Amino acid sequence: MKLFLLVTVCAAAFATVASLECGENCAVCEDQHPEVCTECAEGYSLNNGACIKCPQSCGSCWKTNKFCKTCNTGYFAADPNAEEKVCESCSVEHCEVCPGNNCTECSEGYSLNNGTCVPCPQSCGSCWKTNKFCKTCNTGYFATDPNAEEKVCESCTAAHCEVCPGNNCTTCSDGYFKKTYPNGTVECVGVESAGRSLVSFTLVLLLVFVMML
């Protein structure tokens, strides 16, 4: 048992010394020439004998050369079938995924429209990154088809309305309250406006009362 522990400790010590002898960020080097690195540590690639950080274009890189295994977001492989990939930047601004430099998915907050990435429409609370449609509608808008995944959102008809499923106002903006007329029409009325109407109505009632005396 003591012999086993001694062998284990010695092996660990030898590995530590060996790793210390290798160059910076080098995981494996030649025994007789420790300055010659043959494999870099994770996150580094071998370039002209030195270990450098993986290029920004790489999602992951080979530890034994300067090429990418996978491409980073916003980059595409010049030759997607190659094991040792060269990754180039998507030509479309705000594009995340562009196989063959053809944008198929935009960054968060942008939607794909005719091959370009444009800001999400104002009507969208959130939008799909692969097309021009909304996932959810913004405040003051409603989905023409609430069951559709790819939603088209239109503005609430009632002014100062925040929530209007099916274009039926259910919640007004702060400082407004919902007023429903006999014909079913809904209006968001300002508190100040309602206060003035109430005062006017009170004055009319008071005038009628005085005339009756």
Image: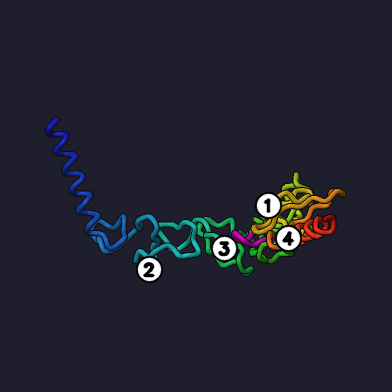
- Residue indicated by mark 3: 74
| Sequence order check, earlier mark of 2 and 3 | 2
> Would you call the spot at circle 1 few (<14 residues within 10 Å), some (14-19), or many (20 or more)?
many
> Would you call the spot at circle 3 few (<14 residues within 10 Å), some (14-19), or many (20 or more)?
many
Measure the C-alpha gap from mark 1 to mark 3. 25 Å
| Residue sticking out furthest to the top | 1
Q: Nearer the viewer, mark 1 or mark 2?
A: 1
Residue visible at 73% across and 60% down in the picture: 199
Q: Give the residue type at disc 2.
A: Asn
* 110 magenta-colored: yes
Query: Vertically, is 168 above or below 97?
Result: above
Q: Nearer the viewer, mark 4 or mark 3?
A: 4
Q: Give the residue type at disc 4.
A: Val
Residue visible at 64% across and 68% down in the picture: 92
Magenta segment, which residues? 106-112
Look at the numbered disc 1 and give the secondary structure of its residue: strand
Query: Vertically, is 57 above or below 149?
Result: below
The disc placed on residue 48 is 2
| Sequence order check, earlier mark of 1 and 2 | 2
Question: Is 67 or 164 nearer to us in this picture?
Answer: 164
| Residue sticking out furthest to the right | 183
Do the residues bearing badges 4 and 2 touch, measured as CB atoms within 8 Å?
Answer: no
> Would you call the spot at circle 2 few (<14 residues within 10 Å), some (14-19), or many (20 or more)?
few
| Sequence order check, earlier mark of 4 and 3 | 3
Do the residues bearing badges 1 and 2 touch, measured as CB atoms within 8 Å?
Answer: no
